[in-house]
């Protein structure tokens, strides 16, 4: 018997069709849920192994809302959707589904999609460094880090989001001595910030005296969750909960008690701005993971602040000559940032597979490099990797380039030609800049992906090809789909396994490694003895925004080496227009709008405060404005956490 599948779909006819197709193919269908609420019931009662998930459902919650909980429960899912709205596609993609199925779909599409998804799932379980870790192991990993207690608390808060999403968590020790709770609260940058109780009293304008005279929240919150209405009732019984909840607009809560190693009880309370933020499944999940929560209390909450790593000082930086360490060199891809390692994990997972891959990222981030590695690590490595730059193909020759043509197929076709797909037979085709492909060529490409066959121009039959497709784009494909320039069905076909490459400015910690790597390479090539960068030169590299990403860094290092007269590079010729935050230069004067200046100033202050917004030493205090005003400015100016790091 094949896997047990739950269908979450509100259109009965679609759901029923799906059920019939699945059962015919030997799968078990454990139920059909038209809403998230019903799905949660069935998930608990039937414990399916897979979920097919529509996006818009009965009730206020969508499939995307359910996706987060499925991930926490470790249940893989595939979307079934006909939606082309950009924001929705982006939100769906962010939940990392195992596939998308476009309505209306054919039986064959469904079964192929399931096969691919199941294979990918088994691979990801095998390869992913983190997927197999239990919650307890993850807590232990965080606890063992040589980082400050606050940093560990923040990491715990982020990690716990996968189990129980929250906007704030309070941690209170119940030792009969009214020990004050402390809080981890998400700010407008989505960073968790620890707060002492008196800081929160100050923010909410409550005096210590008033607080002490108020009745503490008692056992009524033990191991329970409170949705909209119950939460409002709870607030009526507790003045502090009312002030605190109303100030931060929390609408639901979930509490769980955890005993520490000395027998004291700690209450963890999660608060959400959503009216129905919590459910029985999450409570269940937390109760089943008591060991992890105990470890959190014993090994992080109760520990004194120690083991803070000294800030990294960039000294004159010698060129790194040994690039064999797998930590910084993944098949010739240099970098040790978390963001890049997440990319390596994905590459490891997908390489052995035959699924199509789409690599997204700004120009120069290494998309082609990653495609080459996927091919090199795949079972197709001994067959050709054919690279096609779709943007460079003359518009009238695209089809003949890709699929070939017969002699006389069009004026000028004096010979027959083998197309790129045929050249790649048995191997991989890398379609760079796929977003540039005209719609007519997209239809043909879709056909190759679906049927695995091509038709030469002017030919009168099809030929089977066995080609793996890796595509790349620096365009926002969701936007292209929404604006009608890219076919939705092709988008879904390619999006089986998306890999997004971070921009260099998002992973600045890789700059010294990359710069030294390129320096070493060019020094060897030119026979020059240049061994590293001065502190100032390296700082200049770190301060720059890198709009051209790694390619730009590579060229700049090469140029600096050629111009250098010393043994270390002291002078870097950074392009002036693009130093972080700089504007256009007009008559020697940088023209910037007030909004740009405000954004830059807030960003600088946020960096200074390490993202802390509220409370003492927070950005709001430094800017002398209320934290609520700062929060709305951060949202309005589009400042993201990544920019503050
Ligand atoms: N992590 C890395 N380590 C070392 N070199 C890299 C790395 N990533 C990219 N490069 C180098 O940077 C240059 C640009 O990479 P690549 O051509 O793969 O980028 P791209 O994203 O495909 O660019 P485009 O969108 O313009 O086609 C290449 O010379 C490549 O070898």
Image (spheres, rainbow, N blue to C red):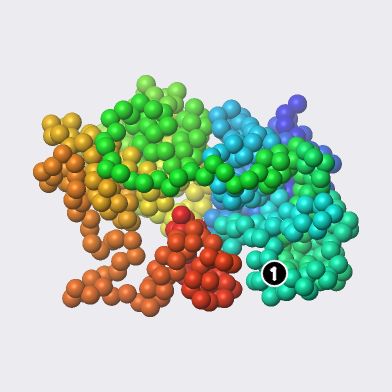
Which is more toward the observer, 164 or 425?
164
- In the picture provided, is 621 more to the left or to the right than 512? right
Q: In the image, residue 284 lies at what x, y percent?
A: 81, 44
Disc 1 element: helix
Which is more toward the observer, 241 or 392?
241
Question: Looking at this rendering, what residue extends furthest in the right direction?
Answer: 220
Q: Which image quadrant for residue 421? A: top left
Callout count:
1
Can residue 18 be seen here?
no
Q: Residue at x 42, y 32 (%)?
A: 327
- In the picture provided, is 573 more to the left or to the right than 67? left
Can residue 504 be seen here?
yes
- Work out whether 641 lies above or below 586: above
Q: In the image, residue 532 lies at what x, y percent?
A: 23, 39
Q: In the image, residue 38 lies at what x, y percent?
A: 81, 51
Looking at the rendered image, the quarter that the N terminus falls into is: top right
Q: Residue at x 33, y 29 (%)?
A: 323
Residue for badge 1: 201
Q: Residue at x 81, y 45 (%)?
A: 264
Q: In the image, residue 452 lies at what x, y percent?
A: 47, 33
Q: Residues within 10 Å of mark 1 (few under 14, many from 20)?
A: some
Q: Residue at x 69, y 45 (%)?
A: 302
Q: Which image quadrant for residue 336? A: top left
- In the picture provided, is 193 more to the left or to the right than 521? right
């Amino acid at each position: 018997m094949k896997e047990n599948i739950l269908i979450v779909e509100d259109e009965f006819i679609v759901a029923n069709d799906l059920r019939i197709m699945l059962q015919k193919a030997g799968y078990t269908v454990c139920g059909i849920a038209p809403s998230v609420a019903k799905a949660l019931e069935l998930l608990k009662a039937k414990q399916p192994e897979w979920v097919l998930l529509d996006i818009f459902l009965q009730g206020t919650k969508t499939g995307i809302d359910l996706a987060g909980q499925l991930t926490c429960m470790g249940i893989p899912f595939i979307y079934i959707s006909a939606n082309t709205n950009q924001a929705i596609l982006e939100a769906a993609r962010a939940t990392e589904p195992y596939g998308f199925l476009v309505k209306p779909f054919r039986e064959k599409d469904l079964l192929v999609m399931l096969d691919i998804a199941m294979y990918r799932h088994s691979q990801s379980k095998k390869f992913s460094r983190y997927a197999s870790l239990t919650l307890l192991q993850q807590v232990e990993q965080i606890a063992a880090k040589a980082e400050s207690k606050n940093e560990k608390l923040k990491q715990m808060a982020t990690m716990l989001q996968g189990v129980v999403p929250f906007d704030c968590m309070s941690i209170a020790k119940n030792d009969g001595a009214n020990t004050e709770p402390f809080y981890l609260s998400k700010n407008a940058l989505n960073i968790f910030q620890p707060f002492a109780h008196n800081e929160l009293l100050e923010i909410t304008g409550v005096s210590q005296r008033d607080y002490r005279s108020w009745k503490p929240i008692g056992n009524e919150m033990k191991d329970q969750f409170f949705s909209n209405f119950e939460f409002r009732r709870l607030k009526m019984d507790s003045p502090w909960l009312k002030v605190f909840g109303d100030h931060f607009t929390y609408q639901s809560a979930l509490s769980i008690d955890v005993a520490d190693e000395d027998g004291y009880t700690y209450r963890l309370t999660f608060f959400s701005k959503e009216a129905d933020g919590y459910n029985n499944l999450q409570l269940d999940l937390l109760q089943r993971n008591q060991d992890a929560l105990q470890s959190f209390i014993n090994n992080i909450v109760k520990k004194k602040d120690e083991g803070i790593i000294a800030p990294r000082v960039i000294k004159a930086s010698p060129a790194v000559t040994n690039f064999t360490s797998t930590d910084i060199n993944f098949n010739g891809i240099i970098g040790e940032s978390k963001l890049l390692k997440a990319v390596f994990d994905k590459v490891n997972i997908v390489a052995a597979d035959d699924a199509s891959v789409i690599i997204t990222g700004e120009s120069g981030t290494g998309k082609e490099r990653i495609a080459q590695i996927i091919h090199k690590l795949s079972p197709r490595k001994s067959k050709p990797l054919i690279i096609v730059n779709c943007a460079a193909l003359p518009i009238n020759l695209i089809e003949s380039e890709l699929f070939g043509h017969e002699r006389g197929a069009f004026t000028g076709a004096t010979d027959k030609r083998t197309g790129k797909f045929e050249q790649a037979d048995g191997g991989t085709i890398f379609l760079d800049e796929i977003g540039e492909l005209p719609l007519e060529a997209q239809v043909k490409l879709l056909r190759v992906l679906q049927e695995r066959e091509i038709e030469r121009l002017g030919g009168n039959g099809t030929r089977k090809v066995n080609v793996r497709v890796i595509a790349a784009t620096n365009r926002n494909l969701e936007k292209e789909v929404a604006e009608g320039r890219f076919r939705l069905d092709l988008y879904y076909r390619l999006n089986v396994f998306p890999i997004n490459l971070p921009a260099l400015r998002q992973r600045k910690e890789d700059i010294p490694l990359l710069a030294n790597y390129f320096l070493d390479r060019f020094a060897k090539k030119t026979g020059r003895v240049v061994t590293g960068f001065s502190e100032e030169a390296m700082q200049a590299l770190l301060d720059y925004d890198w709009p051209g990403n790694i390619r730009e860094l590579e060229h700049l290092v090469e140029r600096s080496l050629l111009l250098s007269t010393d043994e270390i590079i002291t002078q870097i010729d950074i392009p002036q227009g693009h130093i972080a935050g700089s504007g256009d230069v007009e008559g020697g004067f940088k023209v910037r709008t007030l909004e740009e200046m405000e954004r830059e100033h807030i960003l600088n202050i946020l960096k200074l405060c390490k993202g802390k917004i509220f409370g003492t030493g927070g950005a709001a205090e430094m800017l002398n404005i209320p934290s609520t005003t700062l929060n709305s400015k951060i949202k309005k100016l589009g400042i993201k956490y990544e920019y503050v790091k």
